[in-house]
Image: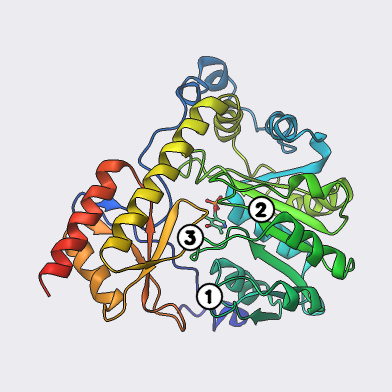
Amino acid sequence: MSTFFNERYAGIVPYVPGEQPHDRPYVKLNANETSVPAAPGVRSALDDDLFADLGRYADPAALPFRRAVAARFGVDASWVFAGNGSDEVLAFFFLACFGPRDPVCFPDITYGFYRTYCDAFGVPCREIPLKCDFSLDVDAFCAASEHVVIANPNAPTGLAVSPADIERICRANPRRLVIVDEAYVDFGNPTCVPLVETLDNLVVVQTFSKSRNLAGAHIGFAIARPDLVDDVRKVKMCFNPFNMSAPTMALGVAALADKDYYDACIERTVAERERTAEELAHRGFTVLPSHANFLFASRAGTDASAWNASLRSQGVLCRHYSEPRIEDWLRITVGTREEMDAFLAATDAFLGGR
Ligand SMILES: *Cc1c(COP(=O)(O)O)cnc(C)c1O
């Protein structure tokens, strides 16, 4: 640590994303991204007009992009907050809404960034245990006095709750904000966006990194009441007014224009998810019923960390968490048919070689 690092960060534990090694080619199933390209129109969005205007700052209100998102969901653009990935969008909401006297709660097993934001921004948090079967304890969230953050479907379990359960949590205490992180919602789940119009305390966050094949562009957005969107905008304007670049916004608008392409991609991913889950079950694995683009699998008598290390040595990257309750599990991103065949072959080599 340098002598200049502020002491308030002394104990900070940075978020650790899935590794991105470059020492050899890998079948990369460790970060829930995809090797499938974005829609064809996304490439043509980077045109001469865009290039000619790069000397100018992009619109700090990100209006063209927010209008496109708003049109997709049938709301006004004033209901949309946009940013560089949902990580940044979530960070702005944490900064704007939570603090030492406004604690939050989230499940004990969920997206690790929520804890990181709390550490970094000095927000007290409480982890509410998932039930034994890893399902969300909806009643405990209804009873909690803290603000609520829920990934739905959850990561790394892939399990989802219904919009009716989210509505119940919102209505249980309207003085709490409820942020629903829908990073994986497009893989076959109903979104809670329509509830935002009737529930004043609901925020829905989505990303282009998973179902829109655009992790490298890093685009995210939230849908919430206009007064709340405007409050979060004020915080953004104190920090990084031009956060979304013009190319990024153009890529996002173009992606929204090709629903058919993405529907077809999602359909293939869901089919591959179900096939891989079945193949793992044949080999004696327990696989949670996933609503996302990844599987969470475990096998009695199999050390998940050794399984992960063996896969890695065979050029297949998955994600293992050395954390309580889930150290026996592996999270496997659902890729293409060829990638999943490589994963299954490497798993067979591991099982056969023991
Ligand atoms: C991947 C992921 C994100 C981050 O998405 P970005 O838009 O790439 O920042 C947020 N929440 C969950 C639950 C995720 O899995």
Comes first in the chain, label 3 or label 2:
2
* The CB of the residue at mark 3 lies under 8 Å from ligand 1: no
> Is 292 in front, or is 271?
271
Circle 3 or circle 2, nearest the eye? 3
Q: Count neighbours of disc 2 (C-alpha within 10 A) and say few if under 14, some if 14 to 19, many if 20 or more.
A: many
Mark number displayed over residue 241: none
Task: Look at the numbered discs 1 and 3 and tell me whether their residues touch, using CB distance below 8 Å.
Answer: no
Where is mark 2, residue-wise?
A: 89
**Residue 74 occupies quadrant:** top right
Q: Count neighbours of disc 3 (C-alpha within 10 A) and say few if under 14, some if 14 to 19, many if 20 or more.
A: some
Where is mark 1, residue-wise?
A: 133
* Quadrant showing the C terminus: bottom left
Which residue lies at the image location 61% right of the left edge and 28% below the top edge?
253
For the residues marked 2 and 1, what is the alpha-carbon distance in whole angstroms?
30 Å
Q: Residue furthest left?
A: 353
Which residue lies at the image location 74% right of the left edge and 61% below the top edge?
166
Mark number displayed over residue 289: 3
Q: Residue furthest top?
A: 48
Q: Position of residue 248 (x, y in %)?
A: 56, 35
The quarter of the image that holds ligand 1 is: bottom right
Q: Amino acid at mark 3?
A: Pro
